[in-house]
Amino acid sequence: MAAMDKEIMEQYKGVYVFAQQVDNELSGIAFELLGKAKDLAADLNADVTAVLIGSGVKGLVDQLAEYGADKVIVVDDPELKDYRTEPYTHALASVINEYKPEIVLVGATAIGRDLGPRVSARVETGLTADCTVLEIGDFPLNPIPGKEQKHNQLLMTRPAFGGNTIATIACPDNRPQMATVRPGVMQKIAPVAGAKAEVIEYNPGFTPDNKYVEIMEIVKNVADTVDIMDAKILVSGGRGVGSPENFKILEDLAEAIGGTVSCSRAVVDSGWKPKDLQVGQTGKTVRPNVYFAIGISGAIQHVAGMEESDIIIAINKDEDAPIFDVADYGVVGDLNKIVPMLTAKIKDAIA
Ligand code: FAD
């Protein structure tokens, strides 16, 4: 990828967020990205713009304003009713080419993971996937003799090499600087009731070239469990639970305290629980009020998905288990004894 001309690069201004919606309902990630975009825009003295793509979606503009958008660019077209790679790529890439944002943030959802890289290739810039930290700073981080240190760059931090190291990546020679961020990582702001955004309607036009997949039928995945990312209390089990049947003692605890069961990857890999319930780097990032880590060793890839929980309670028979390094409360002992005792005490206290 060739470096951009400096004068052209300077035309790129503002922090843009792809405001994902499905069935005309904004996804939580849109609000989380707006929260982060506000911080970045404050450092750059720039505006926050949400890019809202869909069909009949104008009614969602005020919600985006309440969560921090100064402007909303609406691309509204019947071709954009349901997500399809080509029309959405055409829409977002066209917005970027027309309005020249300095930064574009996209959620690392199923849609965002499909859309983000295609758009970045289309507009000939880089994209850092699955970022956990985004900030404005100098790049390279420390001056290197003979190399220009650029200021006000988007520093994009993400786990690398299977989570064994953390890499900070920048895109100093091209614009926009693009990143995807997993749901649950960034924090939304408290909504400001009645806030209004400037609305810009833009439609690049759609041709057979950019709508060549036809949707015949949409089959929705109907989940009968609470999304672990929304749960206030998570009772999470690891390989130490021993068997799928033994998860019953965690389910009893969860029921007693109004929590939801989640798990480590070892549990998913063993086929004991579905992938939907996995916490961690390759699972979901959770931030509950209380996180029970039961029979979970505390591998770095697991901790990456739950360390922001308000209170972490670990139960493990190995007093040296790394989970105790991040736990607020730790119980060393056999989970088969401790968990039922805890459940009984909680039930007594509630009765
Ligand atoms: P173990 O490490 O086997 O730990 C079991 C724990 O249970 C031990 O600490 C043991 O002392 C305790 N125990 C056993 N019996 C009892 C008992 N009776 N009472 C009390 N305690 C008991 N992992 C994730 O969880 N999420 C991810 O998203 C994830 N992504 C990964 C991505 C990559 C690229 C890689 C390489 C790995 C990833 N992993 C992930 C795997 C991770 O490295 C660990 O292997 C995994 O988290 C271990 O799961 P565990 O703690 O349940 O099992």
Image: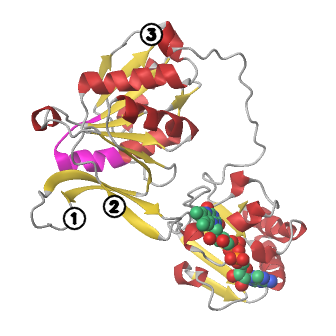
Q: Residues within 10 Å of mark 2 (few under 14, many from 20)?
A: some
Which residue lies under the disc numbered 1? 141
x, y percent for residue 225: 75, 48
Q: Which residues are magenta?
A: 36-48
- Tell me which amino acid carries mark 1: Leu
Relative to 190, is 349 on the left or the right?
right
- Tell me which amino acid carries mark 2: Thr
Could you tell me if the residues under marks 1 and 3 are in contact, i.e. CB atoms within 8 Å? no
Residue 40 falls within the magenta-colored stretch: yes
Mark sitting earlier along the chain (1/3): 1
Residue 51 falls within the magenta-colored stretch: no
**Residue at the image point whose x is 51% and y is 8% from the top:** 208
Relative to 290, is 184 on the left or the right?
left
x, y percent for residue 170: 28, 53
How is the protein colored in the picture? secondary structure
Say which quarter of the image contains residue 314: bottom right
Which residue lies under the disc numbered 2? 168
x, y percent for residue 217: 73, 19
Mark sitting earlier along the chain (1/2): 1
In which quadrant will I find the C terminus?
Answer: bottom right
- Tell me which amino acid carries mark 3: Phe
x, y percent for residue 53: 45, 23
Is label 3's Cβ within 8 Å of ligand 1?
Answer: no
